[in-house]
Image (cartoon, helix red, strand yellow):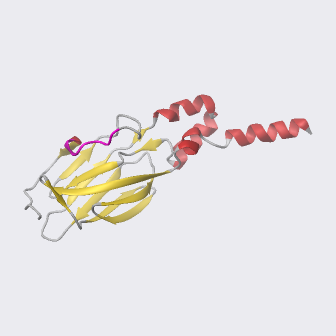
């Protein structure tokens, strides 16, 4: 009987992952839109990755499913060119520690659910440009990436919105 209880406890401990326990497979993001140095309100934004699609009006927040895949963001507002941004995903440091504490199964759970990955928590989309935002270099608890981290690929001039 004691052997069965010990075996069940061991199996149960291997079915959970460290990153999934600490942060889960979802992440809250805030999106702002800009035209130059001016904040643009009321842009309709679509966020998507391989785990789903989410919609919001900027400035706004939503909860997305974490993923290894990039997060694609497209924001549109009348009289402005759309802002298109690809946000790179990063692997959280705790995912590597999970191999030690949660074992291969725990790490596998975190990778499969997306809990091992992270996006920047505050994202700025520049209207009239297409760019890529690099993966966060620090854990999610650190300061958000500044708007200057966006590398425009084909910026078009956008009128200032007041």
Q: In the image, what residue occupies the spot 32% across and 42% down?
A: 144
Farthest-out residue, bottom: 78
Image x and y of residue 96, in percent: 52, 31
Q: Is residue 146 magenta?
A: yes
Q: Magenta residues?
A: 143-148
Q: Quadrant of the C terminus?
A: bottom left
Image x and y of residue 108, in percent: 58, 40
Q: In the image, what residue occupies the spot 24% across and 68% down?
A: 42
Please, is residue 11 above or below residue 78 in the view? above
Farthest-out residue, top: 100
| The image quarter in which residue 46 lies | bottom left
Q: How many marks?
A: 0
Image x and y of residue 142, in percent: 37, 37
Image x and y of residue 145, in percent: 29, 42
Q: Is residue 34 left or right of residue 14?
A: left
Magenta stretch: dominant secondary structure: loop
Q: In the image, what residue occupies the spot 25% across and 51% down?
A: 124
Q: Quadrant of the N terminus?
A: top right
Q: Is residue 32 magenta?
A: no
Please, is residue 122 above or below residue 61 in the view? above
| The image quarter in which residue 38 lies | bottom left
Q: Is residue 60 left or right of residue 151?
A: right
Please, is residue 126 above or below residue 20 in the view? below
Q: In the image, what residue occupies the spot 22% across and 64% down?
A: 41
């Amino acid at each position: 009987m004691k052997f069965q209880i010990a075996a069940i406890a061991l199996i149960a401990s291997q079915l959970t992952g460290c990153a999934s326990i600490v942060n889960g497979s979802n992440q809250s993001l805030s999106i702002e839109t800009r035209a130059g140095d001016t904040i643009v309100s009321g842009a309709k934004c679509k966020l998507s990755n391989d785990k789903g699609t989410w919609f919001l009006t900027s400035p706004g927040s939503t909860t997305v499913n974490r993923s290894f895949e990039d997060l694609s963001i497209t924001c549109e507002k009348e009289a402005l060119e759309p802002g298109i941004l690809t946000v790179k995903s990063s692997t959280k440091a705790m995912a590597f520690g999970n191999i030690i504490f949660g074992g291969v199964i725990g790490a596998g759970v975190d990778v499969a659910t997306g809990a091992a990955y992270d996006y920047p928590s505050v994202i700025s989309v520049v209207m009239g440009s297409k760019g890529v935002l690099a993966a966060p270099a620090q854990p999610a608890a650190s300061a958000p990436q500044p708007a200057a981290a966006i590398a425009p690929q084909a910026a078009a001039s956008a009128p200032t919105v007041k």
